[in-house]
Amino acid sequence: MNHNTPNTFYATNAFTGEPLPDAFPVHGEKEVAQAAEAAAKVARQFRRLDNHKRASLLCSIALELESHSGEIVTRAHLETALPDVRLNGEIGRTANQLRLFADVVRSGSYHQAIFDTPNPDRQPVPKPDIRRQQIAIGPVAVFGASNFPLAFSAAGGDTASALAAGCPVIVKGHTAHPGTSKIVAECVEKALQTEGLPSAIFTLLQGNRRELGQVLVTHPKIKGVGFTGSVGGGRALFNLAQQRPEPIPFYGELGAINPTFILPSAMKASESLAEQFVTSMTMGCGQFCTKPGVVFALNTPETQAFIETAQTLIRKQIPATLLTQGIKQNYQSEVEKRSSDAGINVTFSDAQSPNVASALFVTDSKNWRENSSLEEEIFGPQSLVVVCDDFEDMLTLSENLAGSLTATIHATTQDSALVEQLIPCLEEIAGRLVFNGWPTGVEVGYAMVHGGPYPASTHVASTSVGAEAIHRWLRPVAYQSLPEALLPDALKTSNPLGIQRSIDGKVL
Ligand code: NAP
């Protein structure tokens, strides 16, 4: 039953589809304008805040989340059907992300201070003193993701990296978990109070109407957007961001099938590959953006054995409860459509409503080439095995794939020559190459890349996970011939921040 009114909406119990108690206000144009204006007013103060103070804010948010973990997990479990153990892990990951960005801010490396030493005697014209640093772009909008109610929602990776950069954040909470977002937002608000910082640095807006996100992305005070979600929704918002009188960067993570290539020697050598594959594709009910959505293997007896073992494991899968009714309906209709395609073999697990069945599809490379819809991501516990005629056939397929977050190779040293041919193709389509592993599980560190060519990301030169994600919210400014006293601290000759600098091309 739908209890929503024009001014309020309810969260849905992900297990039953029924509304949960507690109404949430529906925010719209007025609240976007208030939040964006207020964020713009504090943006300068926040971007010029001492690095240690900003790091302290990030650590305070992490502490608040940890001290409210019980309440957060209880609510998130009801709203998402994700198990407590996963949600507790996500709290840990979210807190670690915040602390990683605190370290990044403290180090000052994000300033990227670059100096060109002046030379007044240079002929025919003197060389000026030019110094360059990165500064925060201003208030940004962050869209919470349905599949990571903590690590990629109100205080998740996009918020952490934007606050680290010095950008005020306005979050558009995901309608799938408004109660979780509210508790998390209260933790951020408490941390701002503890640090004595203005509340306008962070605002959570919620609502069940698409206008909210559209008004937010097009508000003139918003200078950048972080988004994780569907290709349709992400593309619509990306287009709006580009059509503004002042277009702004839109960092959207939209979709990926994460191709996996199993070479013949690896298929022969490992008996547990099928088990590893099914574990990875069904992890989190197949609702990870890094799920291996397609496996390419050669037509050998070992591949047939791999498929049979995977099919046996699929039949034994426990029925899955998906995050939202919308994701469930989408999964069921896409799986049904794919099952009825010609040239496709499908194996299901048992499942009765309200749960869904896991599914494994098998086809050949000829059918893959003829049916472009097979390359579309289906969000949920399913994957596809494509049997290739030979390695040339596999290599040609690898050259024609759309962008993905990851690409994986399984091989032994016997297949080194083949791997050497595959790697250059996969570098061109993926943000992360995985060797003899599985793509689910994204380490949050300094070297991580979570992005890739479209549709993996709308901004091919960026990552949404890891320390480098901070650079999405910064832009370079060069200062020519400014006296020492007027230069920002990161660019003063005396180096009061004690940061690493590049002087005339040499890192010091
Ligand atoms: P979604 O439908 O793209 O929604 C994401 C966010 O964008 C929500 O806040 C949504 O608002 C908003 N939105 C979507 N379309 C919009 C539009 N046209 N104008 C303004 N705002 C818009 O994604 P989802 O709800 O998380 O899941 C749906 C599908 O997205 C899944 O089935 C899956 O295919 C894909 N997905 C992909 C990833 C990934 O990592 N690549 C992650 C999650 C989901 P509302 O809340 O009001 O709808």
Image (cartoon, helix red, strand yellow):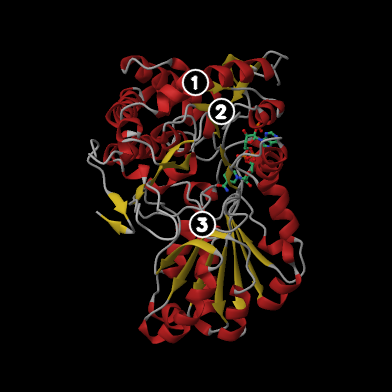
The crowd level at tag 3 (other Cα within 10 Å; few <14, some 14-19, many 20+) is: many
Instruction: Kindly report the distance in space between the C-alpha atoms of the residues bearing marks 2 and 1.
Output: 9 Å
The crowd level at tag 1 (other Cα within 10 Å; few <14, some 14-19, many 20+) is: some
* Quarter assignment of residue 4: top right
Q: Which mark is residue 182?
A: 1
- Asked if 50 appears above or below 33 in the picture, the reply is below
Looking at the rendered structure, the secondary structure element under dot 2 is: loop
Instruction: Kindly report the distance in space between the C-alpha atoms of the residues bearing marks 3 and 1.
Output: 31 Å
- Asked if 97 appears above or below 363 in the picture, the reply is above
Looking at the rendered structure, the secondary structure element under dot 3 is: helix
Q: Which residue lies under the disc numbered 3?
A: 281
Q: Amino acid at mark 2?
A: Gly
Q: Residue at x 25, y 37 (%)?
A: 497
* In this view, the mark in front (3 or 2): 2
Q: Amino acid at mark 3?
A: Met
Question: Is the CB atom of the residue marked by disc 3 within 8 angstroms of ligand 1's nearest atom?
Answer: no
Question: Is the CB atom of the residue marked by disc 2 within 8 angstroms of ligand 1's nearest atom?
Answer: yes
Q: Are marks 2 and 1 in contact (CB under 8 Å)?
A: yes
Q: Amino acid at mark 1?
A: Lys
Which of the two labelled residues, at mark 3 and mark 2, occupies the earlier sequence position? Answer: 2
Q: Which residue lies under the disc numbered 2?
A: 173
Which of the two labelled residues, at mark 2 and mark 1, occupies the earlier sequence position? Answer: 2
Instruction: Kindly report the distance in space between the C-alpha atoms of the residues bearing marks 3 and 2.
Output: 27 Å
Q: Which mark is residue 314?
A: none
Looking at the rendered structure, the secondary structure element under dot 1 is: helix
- Asked if 416 appears above or below 478 in the picture, the reply is below
Could one spot residue 184 in this view of the protein?
Answer: no
Which of the two labelled residues, at mark 3 and mark 1, occupies the earlier sequence position? Answer: 1
* Quarter assignment of residue 267: bottom left
Q: Residue at x 73, y 61 (%)?
A: 373
The crowd level at tag 2 (other Cα within 10 Å; few <14, some 14-19, many 20+) is: many
* Quarter of the figure with the N terminus: top right
